[in-house]
Amino acid sequence: MSKINKILLFRLMLLLLISFMFTGEVYSQNSLSYKANQGNYQYSDAQYYYNIIKDGSKYKLTDPKNRNVLQKEYDTIIKNAHFIKTVIGDSITIYRCSTLKKIKLHNTQQAYFVRDGLEVLTKKGAQYYDNSISKIDNFPYIELFKCGTVYSETYRLKQDSKTKKYSLNIEKGDFGATTRQLTLELKGLPDNIEELSFLNDKTYLTKSINNDYNPHPLLIKATKNGKDGMYTYNLEDVIYPKKQKTKKREIYTIDTVTRDTIYVPELLEYAYFFNKKGTIAFKEVLPIVYNQIQQNTNTGLIYLYKDNKIGLYPKHMSTSFSVFDEKTTSFYKITKNEKKGWLDIKTFKEYYFD
């Protein structure tokens, strides 16, 4: 064997040895490396390998050869990089995406994907699970960078100190600068209102993609005699004053060198900044009968309080919950008509297991 061949053989053996060492470490589920980084190792590109195919009113999961890999048809199939969720009637099953192995979760009523884990409601209650299907209290907080130059809208409610009339000022801008402004006189509000505010209990709010939830700038809270109600408006219904026609002045000047006559166009007052004024009619959404209307700044849910009961806008406005406690992001403990159960705030479906 020549010297060159010996060197090549040595390099090949060394490469195989290194590959074996790393492979054994990475894919050994008993290793510390695997346990510390299980979220990475359980990630699978199998979600791109499998396809969800509609067959009539049902769905099936197929591979590139169009084989039904789960050997069933379902009402619903949802998948991500970690899990596959199938639904037949009220029966929900979760599979590992990388292996198609069924995950044992007894009496599953509803389940949602959360990052690399699951949020599950069973007859025993609501629970988070990490990627290894171990119970956890919550997922680690992720701090996201927020850009300061995104498109944004700012809303301000103002009251004239003399006339006591309210107005709404809306500013819209790009890259941190205001480019459009709209001032609206408000119509349709009841007399003797004590306070007018947004759902954040303030007279101003900002809406952009940086918001963690929808602040609902089109919903306005009115307070009268210690009670709250809700009003809304539609910007498509704004009435603008008719513009008065003015005769354009034709301005000319004489060039001092050529003695030519030059036309000078009128300058626009607001070339890059537009300020419009108009009126808008408010419409009642909820009567002024609630003890309090408030939006949760963490979840974005709009709570309605009345007679020591709780309701939710817009799905549960009857204020029928005597207990309404968050357990997970989607599932809340409830008591309604002295009956204990759970509410899924994604679907607003109520579950009672007793």
Image (spheres, rainbow, N blue to C red):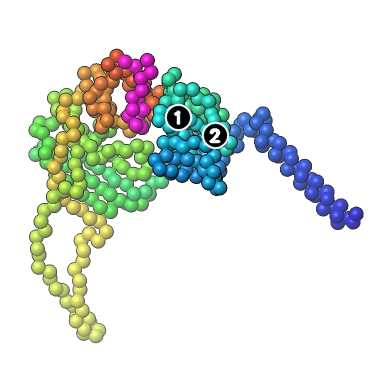
- Left or right placement of residue 17 versus residue 153 in this view: right
Percent across and percent down for residue 310 are: 27, 22
44 magenta-colored: no
Task: Write the start and end of the magenta stretch as one range.
Answer: 339-354
Q: Which of the 4 image quadrants contains residue 55?
A: top left
Q: Residue at x 25, y 52 (%)?
A: 180
Instruction: Check disc 2 and report the residue beneath it.
Output: 96
Percent across and percent down for residue 5 are: 85, 55
The answer to whether residue 336 shows anywhere in this view is yes
Could you tell me how far apart the alpha carbons at marks 2 and 1 are, in whole angstroms?
14 Å
Is residue 291 placed above or below 64 in the rendered structure? above
| Element class at badge 2 | strand
Report the number of discs: 2
Instruction: Check disc 1 and report the residue beneath it.
Output: 92
Is residue 256 placed above or below 242 in the rendered structure? below
Percent across and percent down for residue 259 are: 21, 85
Q: Quadrant of the C terminus?
A: top left
- Left or right placement of residue 292 versus residue 64 in this view: left
| Element class at badge 1 | strand
Q: Quadrant of the N terminus?
A: bottom right
- Left or right placement of residue 91 versus residue 286 in this view: right
Percent across and percent down for residue 168 are: 19, 43
* Residue 28 or residue 73, whichever sits in front: 73
**Other residues around mark 2 within 10 Å, as few (<14) / some (14–19) / many (≥20):** many
Q: Nearer the viewer, mark 2 or mark 1?
A: 1
Q: Residue at x 53, y 46 (%)?
A: 66
What residue type is disc 2 on? Arg
Q: Which of the 4 image quadrants contains residue 204?
A: top left
The answer to whether residue 329 shows anywhere in this view is no
What residue type is disc 1 on? Ile
* Residue 14 or residue 211, whichever sits in front: 14
Q: Residue at x 49, y 36 (%)?
A: 72
